[in-house]
Amino acid sequence: MKVTVVRNILDANDRIAAENRLLFDEKGVYVINVMSSPGAGKTSLVEKTITALKDRWRIAVIEGDIQNTYDADRVAALGVCAVQINTGGACHIDGNMVREALPALDLDRVDLLITENVGNLVCPAEFKIGENAKVMILSTPEGADKPAKYPLMFQESSVMVINKIDLLPYVDFDLAKARRDALAVNPGLEIFEVSCKTGQGLEGWIGWLAGRVEAFRNR
Ligand code: MG
Ligand code: ZN
């Protein structure tokens, strides 16, 4: 019985996400869904991405948090339109929450929509929002065992950004194991090693995203 209920919720969400996707296609908006544990560096990566690409494309951000507007305030300070979704306790954002946030954005004036999910390695991976790509961040202090422990997150994502590589000398993080275990669940996963703090490796991630947005616009 419980399994049936969960299945129905996910089916209903998939329908709403597909409607969001149709709207994004019509408006020419490329959408990424950024996911990670709390503190892995989602907002920092979003800030670096905005700074790198805001002169090229019009960017908007949806910030999902359980409460407060700290992250939305950080990205709005960069001069892009930022909308906050407060999930009121829910540990992920879903298709309906994104749909309800969209009237606050002028999609005719958006080329790239970055959605920052609630910090959580579990259920955000289960809920589509109408994105083109899911991007997950694994930071080195979290440990290299996460791909094996939370396989769905790594399976559903197009990209794994390994953040905080500047901390590698100080933490026990087996880079080879993290890559190997992530690729075991998702052989097509794109992997970038970066430090949002020092800027190291960010050009790989930015180049990947720019290529995707370009291909979408030329579709
Ligand atoms: Mg954040
Ligand atoms: Zn959740």
Image: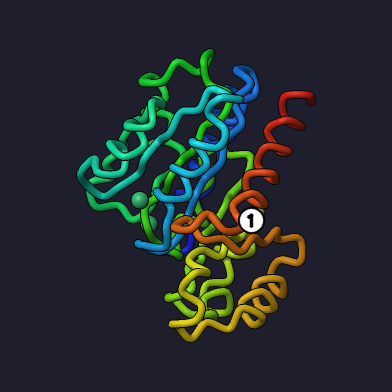
Which quadrant of the view contains residue 27? top right
Q: Which residue is mark 1?
A: 159
Q: Nearer the viewer, residue 48 or 27?
A: 48
Give amino acid for label 1: Val
Residue at x 53%, y 21% (from the top left corner): 110
Residue at x 76%, y 66% (from the top left corner): 187
Quarter of the image where the N terminus is located: bottom left
Above or below, comparing residue 187 to residue 206 in the picture: below
Q: Is any atom of residue 1 visible in this view?
A: no
Q: Position of residue 46 (x, y in %)?
A: 46, 44
In the visual, does 218 lie left or right of 114?
right
Quarter of the image where the C terminus is located: top right
Q: Nearer the viewer, residue 120 or 111?
A: 111
Identify the image's colour scheme: rainbow, by chain, secondary structure or one colour: rainbow
Ligand 1 under 8 Å from disc 1 Cβ = no
Picture quadrant of ligand 2:
bottom left
In the visual, does 117 lie left or right of 126?
left
Mark 1, Cα crowd under 10 Å, few <14 / some 14-19 / many 20+, is many
Residue at x 36%, y 30% (from the top left corner): 82
Above or below, comparing residue 36 to residue 211 in the picture: below
Above or below, comparing residue 144 to residue 139 in the picture: below
Which quadrant of the view contains residue 216? top right
Numbered disc 1: secondary structure? strand
Q: Is any atom of residue 183 visible in this view?
A: yes
Q: Position of residue 197 (x, y in %)?
A: 44, 58
Q: Residue furthest right?
A: 219
Q: Position of residue 118 (x, y in %)?
A: 37, 52
Q: Position of residue 183 (x, y in %)?
A: 71, 71
